[in-house]
Image (cartoon, rainbow, N blue to C red):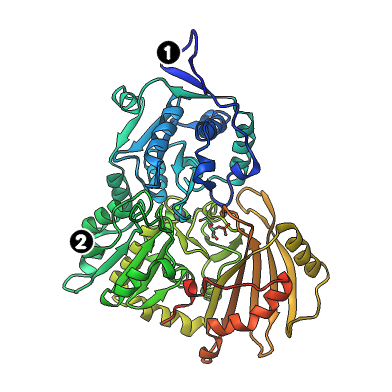
């Protein structure tokens, strides 16, 4: 790469020739940004070229959409990110934008970047993260502007960025060090921890939490998995007067000791330390590398993604949000189609009781939920809120604390009330690596010509899930393959399948099962049973043995 000063132009700007970088489909932003193995991501020129493509996308926006031209640039502590964050800020500044970067190496969880976009009314954000991916991966994503809710970039944006990425020849970058750019005021550094805590204080009434736990020996345990959330969660709890213990709090480049690369994903198999200690705590929670996912336990009891979503559906009214989100008067919650129907049961009941509330099922990818502008969740343990358009692990913790403080009940008590009214949905997901084209063909063969039965299960419905956004009208085709089945014992199950869009290895077919059981006979519908039932069907559809290694992720019930 040759850097050259642009003649007759601004001497503070240099261009880097990045035309030699070969761009392939793998470089396109997928379910949530671009994620690659580190050597691929680090190939010379790729990172500047990607950032230039993001800037070129921004250049194409209208003056109104560009607004104040402020962009928030930050990321998780993943190996090499502090440098990437500086480079991204230098490129954004050279392109005429006004980067705001968290002090302390640019470290910020994804939801804090979104909160900052809202706070500064910014035109967007660049987030250097591969989220929950293993320490060997590197990634980048971009978020929308204040005026568009600060959530993850929509497909129209990622499409455009990919078009631009293929066109980029030169990347503009400031012709100075990062520190010099900060000194000259071309890049602004801020205390992002404070920005985030102040943002949360507008949502959660400090006094309600303080009073709610007054005189109680309430103890919280958090595990940020050495990701971006540690300093943020610590400050948040201090502000709200929550007694906090933490493990794996320090942000680290490999999410653990240098010789022990870890997987910063809040699943039971990676949260053993937290789970081992959880019985001594009223609430414990783990977050992924960039702090947008969560997994919580009340004592030993796992609060599943669907449980927490059902609590949000049932108790959304405890937060002062009415005017802010329910613009049309209606409460709209979003969930990915492949997730559990537990909150749907609550919402259907609330509808019967006359509340103006509905659930929208979306494709996988939080961007689809975020654009609905409300509460929502994904099967992979990400919960969003109406304030900043991103899923947010710390918001999930705060919501649960707030709910307990307000109602003076435990989460389990509140959930038992819900199950009693609605029954219970049992859910898990599994996966299998298989060739994409051949497997898709096989599944499509079954959908186009569904048999009456598969492995003894009645096939009630077999279809493709196509989605049309109620906000933008944009269509997303082939978002999932859906099978509605009746088991030999009369249980109704939804089996859904889709290929993962975040993996960096062989194609991974994700397989999800949701089984609703009403009434008293809940033991027989425990998830492991539902899975044992449905496994032969999944195997037959795919033509290979589907494994459900992530059973525990969702199945730990109290
Ligand atoms: C995975 C999750 C999905 C989530 C995404 C980004 O995507 O399954 O729910 O939106 O990570 O966090 P997938 O690999 O399934 O495409
Ligand atoms: Zn994440």
Judged from the image, the secondary structure of the residue bearing numbered disc 2 is loop
**Residue, x 37% and y 34% (percent of image)?**
100
Residue 492 can be seen in this image? no
Q: In which quadrant will I find the C terminus? A: bottom left
Cα distance between the residues tagged 2 and 1: 51 Å
Residue 348 locus on image (x, y percent):
56, 74
189 vs 442: above or below? above
Mark 2 or 1: the one toward you: 1
Left or right: 21 with respect to 552? right
Left or right: 76 with respect to 441? left
- The residue that mark 2 highlights is 241
Q: Is mark 2 within 8 Å of ligand 2?
A: no
Looking at the image, which is closer to me, 288 or 464?
288
Residue 187 can be seen in this image? yes
Looking at the image, which is closer to me, 407 or 191?
191
Looking at the image, which is closer to me, 84 or 463?
84
Residue 99 locus on image (x, y percent):
40, 32
**Residue, x 56% and y 65% (percent of image)?**
358
Residue 512 locus on image (x, y percent):
60, 70
């Amino acid at each position: 790469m040759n850097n050259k000063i642009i003649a007759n132009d601004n001497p503070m700007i240099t261009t880097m020739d990045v035309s030699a970088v070969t761009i392939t489909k793998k470089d396109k932003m997928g379910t949530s940004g671009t994620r690659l193995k580190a050597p691929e991501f680090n190939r010379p020129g790729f990172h500047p070229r990607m950032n230039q493509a993001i800037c070129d996308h921004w250049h194409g926006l209208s003056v109104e959409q560009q607004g104040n031209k402020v962009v928030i640039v930050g990321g998780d502590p993943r190996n090499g990110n502090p440098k990437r964050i500086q480079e991204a800020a230098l490129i954004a500044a050279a392109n005429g934008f006004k980067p705001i970067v968290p002090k302390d190496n640019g470290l910020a969880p994804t939801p804090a970047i979104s909160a900052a976009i809202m706070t500064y009314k910014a035109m967007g954000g660049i987030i250097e993260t591969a989220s929950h991916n293993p320490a060997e991966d590197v990634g980048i994503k971009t978020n929308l502007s204040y005026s568009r809710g600060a959530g993850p970039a929509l497909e129209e944006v990622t499409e455009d960025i990919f078009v631009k990425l293929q066109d980029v020849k030169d990347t503009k970058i400031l012709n100075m060090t990062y520190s010099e750019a900060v000194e000259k005021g071309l890049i602004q550094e801020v205390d992002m921890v404070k920005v985030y805590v102040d943002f949360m204080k507008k949502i959660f009434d400090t006094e309600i939490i303080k009073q709610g736990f007054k005189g109680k020996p309430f103890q919280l345990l958090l595990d940020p998995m050495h990701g971006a959330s540690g300093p943020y969660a610590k400050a948040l709890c201090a502000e709200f007067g929550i007694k906090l213990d933490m493990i794996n709090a320090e942000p680290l480049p490999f999410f653990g000791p240098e010789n022990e690369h870890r997987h910063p994903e809040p699943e039971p198999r990676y949260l053993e330390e937290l789970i081992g200690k959880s019985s001594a705590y009223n609430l414990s929670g783990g977050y992924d590398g960039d702090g947008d996912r969560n997994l919580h336990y009340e004592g030993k009891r796992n609060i599943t993604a669907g449980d927490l979503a059902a609590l949000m559906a049932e108790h959304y009214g405890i937060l002062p949000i009415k005017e802010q989100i329910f613009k049309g008067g209606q409460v709209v919650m979003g969930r990915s189609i492949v997730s559990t129907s537990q909150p749907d049961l609550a919402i259907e009941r609330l509808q019967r009781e006359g509340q103006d509330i509905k659930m929208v099922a979306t494709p996988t990818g939080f961007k689809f939920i975020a654009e609905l502008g409300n509460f929502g969740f994904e099967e992979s343990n990400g919960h969003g809120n109406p304030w900043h358009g991103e899923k947010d692990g710390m918001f999930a913790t705060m919501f649960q604390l707030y709910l307990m403080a307000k109602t003076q009940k435990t989460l389990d008590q509140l959930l038992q009330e819900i199950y009693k009214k609605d029954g219970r949905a049992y859910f898990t997901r599994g996966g299998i690596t298989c060739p994409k084209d051949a497997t898709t063909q096989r599944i499509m063969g079954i959908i186009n010509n569904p048999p009456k039965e598969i492995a003894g299960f009645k096939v009630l419905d077999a279809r493709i899930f196509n989605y049309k956004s109620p906000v933008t009208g944009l269509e997303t085709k082939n978002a999932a393959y859906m099978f509605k089945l009746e088991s030999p014992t009369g249980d109704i199950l939804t089996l859904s399948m889709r290929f993962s869009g975040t993996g960096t290895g062989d194609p991974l077919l994700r397989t999800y099962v949701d089984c609703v059981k009403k009434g008293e006979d809940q033991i027989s519908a425990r998830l492991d049973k539902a899975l044992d039932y449905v496994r032969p069907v999944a195997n037959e559809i795919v033509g290979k043995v589907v494994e459900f290694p992530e059973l525990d992720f969702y199945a730990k019930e109290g």
